[in-house]
Image: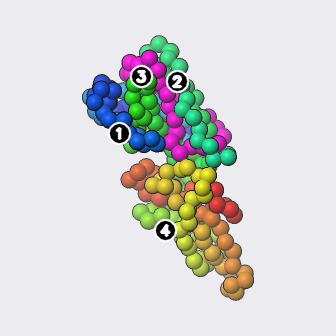
Amino acid sequence: MRTLVVLFAVALVAVFTRAPTPAAGHSVDIKPTAALRVAVQPAVVKLHERSTISISGLASRSLQVRLRGATYANGAPLPWLSLVHVGDVWRGRLQTPALRGIYPIELRTSKSPALIDPHLFLRVFESGTSARPAFDDPAEAVSWWVRTVPHATLVASKAWPLPALDRRDIRLHRLFVVAYSPLGYPDVSDRLGMFVTVVRDGFHGQWRLLEATVEPR
């Protein structure tokens, strides 16, 4: 498993005293001036595996972390998690989302709104996901999946809304429904269907297959 260490700068005083509180459910980007070190280990986990986070360079009475868009199986959002201060480092174990995907990591103190570094994520992937081909167009990632099905021919592909209980960031996750024909069975009645979820490697990254399921999830 990989370890993600992110070094970035944050003007905590400016955020606490001058930054307006965002609307509910929104975050503000971290502003640069003071060194803050965040380590996530491992940065990529399988479903139901746990990862740890440690944060240093932050003077505060309390610190909480949340995986934005992460939920329980019933769709309820995972709550903010309070970190423990050990020496000069804040530590904790990140919670486990019910769905695979890429989750921005948010931080907040008792005096600040939610803060987010646009490059800090926890990836909940099955083995081999990061090695799959990546594409600029999410639909191309869907077409690639169909090509991996032995002797299948893509008939149709359509973007599909995420289910109501799915709170994953739609800028990072896209769902498609596809129809394809097995080799030797061109009739409409023989076509097969699948829901294909693709994931983006960060807010400006490329798209690759996340998973294919018989029901949207």
Please name the amino acid that badge 4 sits on.
Glu
Q: Are marks 1 and 2 in contact (CB under 8 Å)?
A: no
Mark 3 lies on residue: 56
Residue interval drawn in magenta:
45-72
Q: Secondary structure at mark 1?
A: strand
Which mark, by number, is residue 83?
2
Mark 1 lies on residue: 29
Which mark, by number, is residue 140?
4
Circle 3 packing at 10 Å, graded few (<14), some (14-19), many (20+), is some
Q: Is residue 44 above or below residue 56?
A: below
**Of label 4 and label 2, which has the lower sequence position?**
2
Q: Position of residue 173 (x, y in %)?
A: 51, 55
Please name the amino acid that badge 3 sits on.
Ser
Which circle, 3 or 2, is nearer the viewer? 2
Which mark, by number, is residue 78?
none
Judge whether residue 2 is colored magenta: no
Q: Nearer the viewer, residue 110 or 119?
A: 110
